[in-house]
Amino acid sequence: MQSGGAFSLSETEAVYRAIRERRDVRSGFLPDAVEEAVLLRLLRAAHCAPSVGLMQPARFIVVRSHETRSAVHQLFLEANRAAAAAYHDEQQELYRSLRLEGLLQAPLHLCVVCDETSTQGHGLGRHTMPQTSIYSTVCAIQNLWLAARAEGIGVGWVSILDPAALKNLLHVPPEMELIAWLCLGYVEQFAPLPDLERDGWEQRRPLASLLRSEFFDRPYPVTEEEL
Ligand SMILES: Cc1cc2c(cc1C)N(C[C@H](O)[C@H](O)[C@H](O)COP(=O)(O)O)c1[nH]c(=O)[nH]c(=O)c1N2
């Protein structure tokens, strides 16, 4: 069926391509600045995201200064030391070998916070699920991540950071929820696989194994080859 609202074939392919080829990028950032006009396009893409009750709770702090990036890198080093200590033996060795941030290399950074106190949307959709404000903020991040891929800009999400320390550093009011620290920059190329898969930390699961039919305990009748 061809819906009246469908994109052309090439436009549709471009959307799927951005989704397929988006990567979490932590290395290989080029030093070239991300132009203001491009940044604003990415932020507009984020701002188009769905949000519970049209709450639009995402707030974006643009960070370019070396000083702030270095301070965040220090926070990463502390948090990463603690995270590494939670693993043992070979897994700890592998963890320590992973590249988990691009904080000093990426020229542009975004801190994304969720304003849980906002009354925009009048609570619609949040009476039963208040956490949907956070989901909405993450939807905005994903929009930005996909738009960045189309622009040739890599994005790396760093969560190995103490949220309280980060909020303190950036003067984020205590009632706001820290959602993400994103490193952005042009890259020469995007890796074909997630870094964590390439480095032997984790494998992607086949989609067929995640699908259910009608009930959670009933598998969906499709094979991986059909997907
Ligand atoms: C909420 C959240 C938080 C993080 C991430 C992602 C998300 C969604 N990812 C990136 C993650 O490792 C990556 O998305 C997966 O490995 C899949 O790779 P691709 O994104 O497909 O390249 C991530 N990666 C990393 O190296 N350090 C980190 O702190 C985080 N934190």
Image (spheres, rainbow, N blue to C red):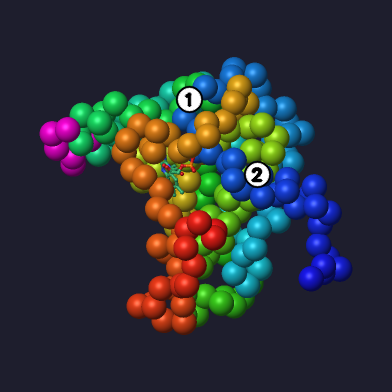
| Local crowd size for mark 2, using a 10 Å CA cut-off: few (<14), some (14–19), many (≥20) | some
The range drawn in magenta is: 84-90
How far across and down, in percent of the image, does residue 130 sit?
47, 72
Left or right of residue 48: residue 176: left
Total marks shown come to 2
Instruction: Pick the residue in front: 179 or 28.
Output: 28
In the displayed orientation, state which residue is furthest to the left.
89
- Disc number placed over residue 48 in the picture, else none: none
Q: Amino acid at mark 1?
A: Ser
Based on the displayed image, in which of its 4 quarters is residue 163 positioned?
top left
- Disc number placed over residue 27 in the picture, else none: 1
Q: In percent of the image, x 58 and y 41: which residue is there?
A: 22
Q: Is residue 13 visible?
A: yes
**The C terminus lies in which quarter of the figure?**
bottom right
Q: Amino acid at mark 2?
A: Ala
Based on the displayed image, in which of its 4 quarters is residue 146 positioned?
top right
Q: Secondary structure at mark 2?
A: helix
- Label 2 and label 1: CA atoms lie apart by 19 Å
How far across and down, in percent of the image, does residue 3 sit?
82, 69
| Local crowd size for mark 1, using a 10 Å CA cut-off: few (<14), some (14–19), many (≥20) | many
Looking at the rendering, the quadrant in which ligand 1 lies is top left
How far across and down, in percent of the image, does residue 224 sit?
47, 58
**The N terminus lies in which quarter of the figure?**
bottom right
Q: Is residue 75 visible?
A: no
Q: In percent of the image, x 41 and y 48: which residue is there?
A: 204
Name the residue carrying label 2. Answer: 18
Q: In percent of the image, x 40 and y 33: which residue is there?
A: 198
Camera-near label (2 vs 1) is: 2
